[in-house]
Amino acid sequence: MMRYDGRKNDDLRDFSFELDYTIHSAGSVLARFGNTKVLCNATIEPRVPRWMTGKGEGWVTAEYGMLPASTNTRNIRESTKGKQSGRTLEIQRLIGRSLRGAVDLKLLGEKSILIDCDVLQADGGTRTTAINGAYIALKLAINTLIHDNEINEDPIKKFLGAISVGVFKNEAILDLNYFEDSKAETDMNIIMNNDGEFIEIQGTAESGTFNAEQLNSMLKLADKGIREIIEKQQKIFGEN
């Protein structure tokens, strides 16, 4: 099947990571997949949450939000509503879990790294784009700690990538844009490390069901796409 944007089923959208996008954070990245753009900024704090104090471990977490003009109709800022939506809470927890899946928190010491992920423009795959950008922002922040002799050893032990897959018109496809995502029979988000190990799988049949053959096809597509993402990350840091 040739998709309406000209891609094959196993093609990623054109993607990029623009480093040092802002000047005040410990690590800043503008992550772009197609028309989806997410700004990821890392902040280092010399403390951990109260419930972790004294354990000798660090903490990595994330916040996520969509700016008002990120979609074709204005999003109301959640701060004006007085609370975050369930979707926002679910996504930022996913980002945090994904990042912690690649980090040895004991080597970080009692420090926290917070990644703010702000969606500037949404066209499908905002959570996976946020995870990919947040990982690079985290790695930049860790490099700052190493450079400043705040830690002695790199606590990031794996590269990681995230991508969406789905079933669209009864065929498995990679990296869904909004048009495909809104009409897909199945939508799935997959996070893996550079050893091909899964960190998280989120999958839902939006209409009907999906079978084992389709699931295996989606997993193979995700593996291919994530390897391409990680390869670009490794080139950025000269570790390929």
Image (cartoon, grey):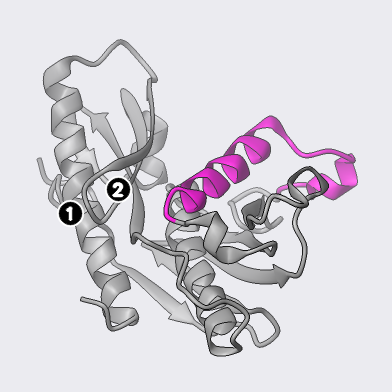
Residue 140 vs 37, above or below: the answer is below
Q: Residue at x 69, y 70 (%)?
A: 43
Is 13 in front, or is 203?
Answer: 203
x and y percentages locating residue 209 in the rendered image: 28, 12
Range shown magenta: 75-102
Badge 1 is on which residue? 11
How many C-alpha atoms fall within 10 Å of the one at disc 1: few (<14), some, or many (≥20)? some
**Kind of residue indicated by mark 1:** Asp
x and y percentages locating residue 58 in the rendered image: 64, 58
Left or right of 71 in this view: 139:
left
Q: Residue at x 63, y 53 (%)?
A: 62
Q: Residue at x 58, y 65 (%)?
A: 108
Residue 117 vs 219, above or below: the answer is below
Badge 2 is on which residue? 175
Total marks placed: 2
Classified by dominant secondary structure, the portion drawn in magenta counts as helix
Residue 172 visible in the shown view: no
Query: Which quarter shows the C terminus?
Result: bottom left
x and y percentages locating residue 116 in the rendered image: 65, 61
Left or right of 52 in this view: 3:
left
Disc on the earlier residue, 2 or 1: 1
Q: Secondary structure at mark 1?
A: loop
Left or right of 200 in this view: 224:
left
Is 146 in front, or is 213?
Answer: 146
x and y percentages locating residue 10 in the rendered image: 14, 48
**Kind of residue indicated by mark 2:** Asp
Mark 2 → mark 1, Cα distance in angstroms: 8 Å
Q: Secondary structure at mark 2?
A: loop
Q: Residue at x 42, y 59 (%)?
A: 132
Q: Are marks 2 and 1 in contact (CB under 8 Å)?
A: yes
Q: What residue occupies the far top of the structure in this picture?
A: 208
